Image (cartoon, helix red, strand yellow):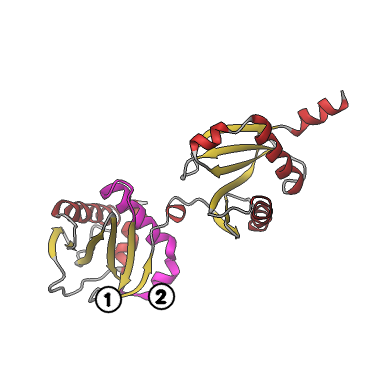
Amino acid sequence: MKQFLALLLSALIIFTSCTNYGKKAKSGNIEVYYKDGVTKEEAQKTADLFLQALQSSNPDDKTTKSFQLSKTGDTALLKMVVADKEKMNAVGDVAFYAIAGLVSDSIYNGKPVNISLTNNKFKPFKTLTFNPAAILNFGTKAKAGNIEVYAKNDFSLEHAQMLADFLSRDMNPASVISFQVDMPENDYYQVYMASNPDKAKALSDIVVNDMCVKLSDSVFYGAGLVFHFTDDKFKPFRTYNYNTAVIDSNAVK
C-alpha cells in the first residue's frame, strides 16, 4: 500500500502556496498544515508517513507536497491538492480510500479519516467519506433494501445480487446488515455476516442450520456452505458448516 501511495503522491499532488492554513509540520518535501483539534505530533507523523512512502518509490521527486489536517470530534479530514483530475479519475477512488485507511491506522488508531481532493488553495471539489469496506477491500458491493453483500474474488456480482435480494426479502431488516460471500473452498460456499457477538452466539445450531437450508436451496443451487458470524471487518468469531451431503445421507437412511 505504501508503494502505491508513493506513486499517487508523485503523480497527483503538487505544491500549493499556503498562507493562513494553520500551523505547519514538515518532513523533507512534505508539509502538513494542521488546525481544529489536530496536534503537532499527529501532523508530524502524517508528514513522516508520506515522506517515507514517497522516498520508497521516487526518491528523486523533490517537489513540495502540501496537505491540511483538521478534526471534528473523532473524525479527521485530510485535504490533498490534486494536480491532474484525469490521472485522479484513472487511479480511482480506491486509491484515496487506501490513503484514508493508512492515515486512520497509522495516526488515529482506526478512527475515521475523510479525504477532500482540492485545488491549490485547499478548496474541495470532491470529498470521500471514511468507508472501512472500501479501505479493506471487502469486495464488490450488491445492495437490496438494508442488505449489502460484498462479493470476493471470482464470485459474480450477479450472484451476490441474488443473495442480497433473497436476504432482503427474508430478513427485511430495519437497519443495514452487511454480508460477504466468496467462492467455494472444498465445495463449500463461504458466507460471512457482520454480527453482534452476544446475539450471534445465542443462536442455536438449529436456527443457524435452518438459515443455511434456505440459503442453499434459494441461492446456492443446493450446495453446501460455511456460514461465518463475524465482526465489522468480516473476521469470524463463530462458524457453522452446512453439509448437504450429510443431510442427503441421513434422508436416505
Residue 31 to residue 185: above or below: below
Q: How many marks?
A: 2
Question: Is residue 99 within the magenta segment?
Answer: yes
Residue furthest top as drawn: 253
- The boundaries of the magenta stretch are 83-112
Mark 2 or mark 1: which comes first in sequence? 2
Quadrant of residue 224 within the rendered picture: top right
The answer to which of 237 and 60 lies nearer the viewer is 237
Q: Are marks 2 and 1 in contact (CB under 8 Å)?
A: no
**Mark 1, other Cα within 10 Å: few <14 / some 14–19 / many ≥20:** few
**Residue 177 position within the rendered picture, expressed as x and y whole percent measured from the top left:** 55, 51
Picture coordinates of residue 118 (x, y %)? 30, 73
* Left or right of 191 on screen, residue 133: left
Magenta residues: mostly which secondary structure? Answer: helix
Would you name the residue on which mark 2 appears? 86
> SS class of the residue under badge 2?
helix
The x, y position of residue 184, in whole percent, is 66, 41
Residue at (37% x, 51% y) in the render: 1
Which residue is depicted at the point 56% across and 44% down? 193
The type of residue carrying mark 2 is: Glu
Label number found at residue 123: 1
- Residue at 20 percent across and 73 percent down: it is 16
- Residue type at mark 1? Lys
Residue 121 x, y percent position in the rendering: 22, 76
**Residue at the image position 38 percent from the left and 61 percent from the top:** 96
Q: Estimate the spatial distance between the alpha carbons at disc 2 and disc 1, rounded to whole Å.
A: 18 Å
Which numbered disc covers residue 247? none
